Image (cartoon, helix red, strand yellow):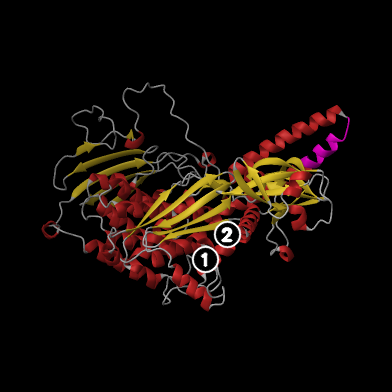
């Protein structure tokens, strides 16, 4: 049995902590007075520092300590939270990530520069503390007794960093109580039997000591006494949410009690025998394992399809019963597997808060990012491949779309530009929209650039949508100058190629002076889909079931009447249709009663004429070979139960083909 590398486990947890710290900083930047976010960032930095020291990332722990100290001062009200401080810690967070990924790299110069920026952000915001510092803070003598649970070290808690943090608070004298250590033959190396007594002389308040134990207080025993350095007697004080127990007058030592975290303290009215609710349990699984399991499920679906076909041609009732059970179980397993692979787009959207924050500083613009539909779920492989296209689109909106503040004010707009990033599910697709309220796309400039580049002939008749699609051509850019953000004409080309590879479509809408909206329609999953199996000539094809609206019958008479116009009347509207037999050049005669499968993407519809509708089919998507990557009619292939290969139709391409055919016919008429 193989065990995970603890260093890799730490790196995974550190990445999550850094994401939480970044999210907290960005939330704090919106509301600098939010104490909850200050506490959240402090806890994240504190945990990262402690974990880093535990796993040997000393440089990370030392660097993070300075950021933690800065937020500790904000938390205690010594200095206010400022945008300069947030920006400095955001930059420091990037450095922490580098220290996690390459701990042996040369990071010293960069770290010193960031710490100088951090000190400037903190010291520059100090007001009203000079007199207190000049007079000198009052010192307090604390006597601290604490013991951790016996299994603390086995659970990952190291007491030595706790003692180091106490030393950072002032002068310390530490005494270890080893009286509870058992005999050698009864000693387990992972058990902790030592308790400590610490005499601390510090100007820090009692809360600073409690903060040292903030993440272990729910299980440990902690007692704190306070007294003035010159006072003859001590005043007992116990770190507990409950009232202190009665003690004899001559007692000078606080009775140890089990400390309670206030956030989860049980109210006095709660029955003593009430059981706490069970926390949700999670298991970390590498993404590669999920991909491997998805492949196995796909093979199972193919084998189940073959078994169903064999059982259907057999008269054995027991075989049919077993086939039905296997079909039911494989379907449930497939659905469960799909749910495991689905992740909310909030994991994707959260990345752009930092991007917009940095772009606002770089461009000198005031930009607000609004997100909607963060709970919409998409296959994890789709999420991973959408990151780069969305980065290009958001950067393009910030640089090209939104105007500078003075230009916006002159146009009667708000000083702050707005970018809306939204997601919604529509059938078997997820629609991701990037919308801004900027200047819009200049159609005349796009046309002039396209004509100059030879992409279109001069004075060509193009719809707005066809014209906007030209911005996705390789090397196409209308920027007057090349900047760090844009102007080289490569970003939008990346968007187009990636969305095409995902079998998605791009729709662009723009209004001069009001802004632009780019919508990406992406399949929910790239692994297994429900499909409609049809026959055209002697070949079989799969149409994604999520795109199918309805099926109609097309008789020979109707087929002959529609020759030359290729329209079918559907509830008082004309729907163009494509004869797949002609498109695929089957060379066969049509069946007596052909079928029309009406498919749609968004508001556009088109009919596909097929010879036979075979039925529903669980489709395991297999990628096309590199020799067929430019065949736009098909988006993939699948293996049928009898071992034959069926091609999967690209719905978006066929709908676009049908709409173009309709436009040509209307223009000719």
- The picture quadrant where one finds residue 598 is top right
In space, the residues marked 1 and 2 are separated at their CA atoms by 18 Å
Task: Determine which of the numbered discs, if any, sits on residue 467 in the image.
Answer: 1
Whether 235 is drawn above or below 516: the answer is above
**Magenta-drawn stretch contains 175:** no
Residue positioned most to the right: 315
Kindly identify the residue that appears in the image at 52 percent across and 71 percent down. Answer: 490
Kindly identify the residue that appears in the image at 20 percent across and 54 percent down. Answer: 78
Camera-nearest residue between 119 and 547: 547
Q: Which residue is mark 2?
A: 499
Q: Nearer the viewer, mark 1 or mark 2?
A: 1
Horizontal and vertical percent for residue 439?
Answer: 37, 64
For the C terminus, the image quarter is bottom right
Chain part drawn in magenta: 304-315
Whether residue 161 is visible here, answered yes or no, is no
Task: Determine which of the numbered discs, if any, sits on residue 107 in the image.
Answer: none
Neighbour tally class for label 2: few under 14, some 14-19, many 20 plus, Cα within 10 Å: some
Q: Secondary structure at mark 2?
A: helix
Neighbour tally class for label 1: few under 14, some 14-19, many 20 plus, Cα within 10 Å: some
Decide which of tag 1 and tag 2 comes sooner along the chain. 1
Kindly identify the residue that appears in the image at 21 percent across and 64 percent down. Answer: 124
**Magenta-drawn stretch contains 313:** yes
Horizontal and vertical percent for residue 229?
Answer: 16, 48
Horizontal and vertical percent for residue 454?
Answer: 56, 77
Residue positioned most to the front: 669
């Amino acid at each position: 049995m193989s065990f995970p590398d603890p260093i890799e486990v730490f790196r995974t947890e550190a990445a999550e902590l850094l994401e939480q710290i970044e999210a907290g900083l960005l939330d704090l930047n919106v509301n600098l007075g939010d104490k909850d976010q200050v506490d959240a960032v402090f806890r994240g930095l504190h945990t990262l520092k402690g974990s880093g020291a535990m796993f040997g990332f000393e440089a990370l722990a030392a660097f993070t300590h300075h950021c933690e100290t800065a937020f500790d001062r904000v938390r205690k009200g010594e200095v206010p939270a400022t945008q300069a401080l947030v920006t400095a810690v955001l930059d420091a967070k990037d450095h922490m990530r580098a220290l996690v990924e390459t701990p042996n790299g040369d990071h010293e110069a960069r770290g010193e520069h960031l710490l100088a920026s951090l000190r400037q952000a903190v010291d520059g915001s100090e007001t009203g503390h000079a007199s207190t510092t000049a007079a000198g803070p009052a010192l307090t003598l604390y006597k601290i007794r604490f013991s951790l649970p016996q299994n603390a070290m086995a659970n990952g808690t190291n007491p030595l960093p706790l003692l180091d943090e106490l030393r950072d608070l002032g002068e310390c004298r530490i005494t270890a109580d080893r009286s509870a250590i058992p005999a050698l033959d009864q000693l387990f190396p992972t058990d902790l039997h030592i308790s400590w007594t610490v005499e601390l002389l510090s100007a820090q308040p009692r809360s600073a000591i409690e903060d040292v134990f903030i993440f272990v207080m729910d299980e440990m025993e902690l007692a704190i006494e306070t007294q003035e350095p010159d006072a003859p007697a001590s005043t007992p004080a116990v770190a507990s949410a409950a009232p202190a127990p009665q003690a004899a007058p001559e007692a000078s030592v606080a009775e140890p009690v089990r400390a309670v975290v206030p956030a989860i303290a049980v109210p006095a009215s709660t029955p003593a025998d009430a059981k706490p609710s069970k926390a949700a349990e999670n298991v970390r699984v590498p993404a590669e394992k999920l991909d491997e399991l998805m492949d196995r499920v796909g093979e199972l679906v193919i084998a189940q399809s073959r078994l169903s076909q064999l059982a259907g041609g057999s008269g054995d009732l027991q075989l049919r019963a077993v086939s039905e059970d296997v079909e039911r179980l494989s379907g449930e397993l497939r659905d469960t597997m799909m749910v495991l692979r689905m992740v909310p787009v909030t994991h994707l959207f959260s990345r752009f808060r930092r991007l917009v924050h940095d772009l606002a500083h770089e461009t000198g613009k005031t930009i607000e990012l609004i997100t909607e539909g963060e709970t919409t779920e998409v296959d994890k492989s789709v999420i991973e491949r959408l990151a780069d296209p969305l980065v290009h689109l958001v950067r393009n909106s910030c640089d090209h779309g939104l105007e500078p503040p003075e230009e916006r004010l002159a146009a009667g707009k708000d000083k702050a530009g707005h970018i809306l990033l939204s997601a919604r599910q529509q059938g078997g697709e997820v629609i991701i929209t990037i919308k801004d309220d900027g200047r819009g796309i200049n159609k005349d400039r796009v046309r002039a650039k396209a004509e100059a580049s030879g992409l279109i002939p001069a004075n060509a008749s193009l719809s707005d949508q066809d014209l906007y699609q030209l911005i996705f051509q390789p090397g196409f850019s209308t920027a007057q100058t090349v900047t760090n953000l844009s102007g080289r004409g490569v970003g939008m080309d990346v968007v187009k190629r990636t969305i095409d590879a995902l079998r998605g479509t791009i729709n662009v809408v723009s209004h001069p002076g009001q802004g632009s909206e780019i919508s990406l329609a992406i399949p929910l999953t790239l692994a297994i889909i429900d499909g409609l199996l049809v026959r055209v000539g002697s070949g079989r094809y799969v149409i994604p079931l999520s795109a199918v609206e309805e099926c109609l019958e097309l008789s020979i008479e109707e087929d002959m009447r529609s020759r030359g116009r290729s329209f079918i009347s559907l509830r008082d509207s004309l729907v163009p249709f494509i004869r797949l037999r002609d498109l695929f050049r089957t060379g066969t005669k049509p069946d007596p009663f052909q079928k029309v499968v009406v498919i749609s993407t968004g508001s556009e519809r088109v009919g596909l004429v097929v010879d036979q509708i075979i039925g529903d089919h669980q489709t395991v998507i297999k990628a096309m070979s590199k020799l067929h990557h430019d065949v736009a009619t098909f988006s993939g292939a699948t293996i049928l139960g009898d071992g034959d290969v069926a091609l999967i139709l690209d719905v978006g391409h066929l709908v676009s083909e049908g709409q173009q055919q309709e436009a040509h016919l209307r223009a000719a008429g």
